[in-house]
Amino acid sequence: MIPDPDEIKEWFQLAEKDLLSAQILLNHEPPIIETSCFHCQQAIEKALKAFLVWKGQSFEKIHDIGYLLNLCKNYGLNPDFINKDKAETITSYAAEIRYPLARLEVTINGFGYCK
């Protein structure tokens, strides 16, 4: 499969918009942390998918960061880029964190990142 430069560019543009959305939400008073975390997860997901498209690798329509990272490892992405626990936490920001009775508690540390 030959990579489509326009598709790769669009994935990265969408990831960039998600990062901007996350930043705006964190700068809001009060910060809207959970939704910001969702946009951070989406940005990571879209950047990884852009990388996979560039490498000609097909992938499932899925929000699982661990799954995407495993595919990326086949193309030289450092396997320690994100550890399994962090990948699972980031994946949970795709949906679980945005619904009532979420089991995740997120806060803002001194650098403004979700943890």
Image (cartoon, rainbow, N blue to C red):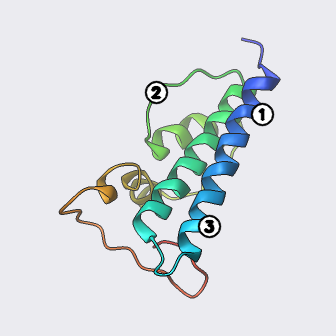
Give the amino acid type for the residue marked by disc 3 in the picture: Gln
| Disc on res. 23 | 3
Labelled disc at residue 9: 1
Q: Earlier in the sequence, mark 3 or mark 2?
A: 3
| Residue found 23% across the figure and 62% down from its top | 102
Closest to the observer, 40 or 22: 22
Q: What separation in Å lies between label 2 and label 1 (alpha carbons)?
A: 18 Å
Q: Is residue 94 left or right of residue 100?
A: right
Label 1: how many residues lie within 10 Å, few (<14), some (14-19) or many (20+)?
some
Q: Is residue 69 above or below residue 108?
A: above
Q: Which residue is mark 2?
A: 61
Question: In this image, 44 relative to 99: left or right?
Answer: right
Q: Residue furthest front?
A: 29
Instruction: Relative to 81, say whether 74 is above or below.
Output: above
Between disc 2 and disc 1, the foreground one is 1
Residue drawn at x 77%, y 19% as measured from the top left: 4
Residue 40 visible in the displayed image: yes
For the N terminus, the image quarter is top right
Place residue 103 in its image quadrant: bottom left
Picture coordinates of residue 87 (x, y %)? 46, 54
Residue 78 appears in the figure = no
Dot 1 falls on a residue whose secondary structure is helix
Whether label 3 touches label 2, CB < 8 Å: no
Where disc 3 sits, the SS reads: helix
Q: Residue at x 70, y 50 (%)?
A: 16
Q: Amino acid at mark 2?
A: Lys
Q: Determine which quarter of the picture holds residue 48.
A: top right
Q: Position of residue 13 (x, y in %)?
A: 72, 41
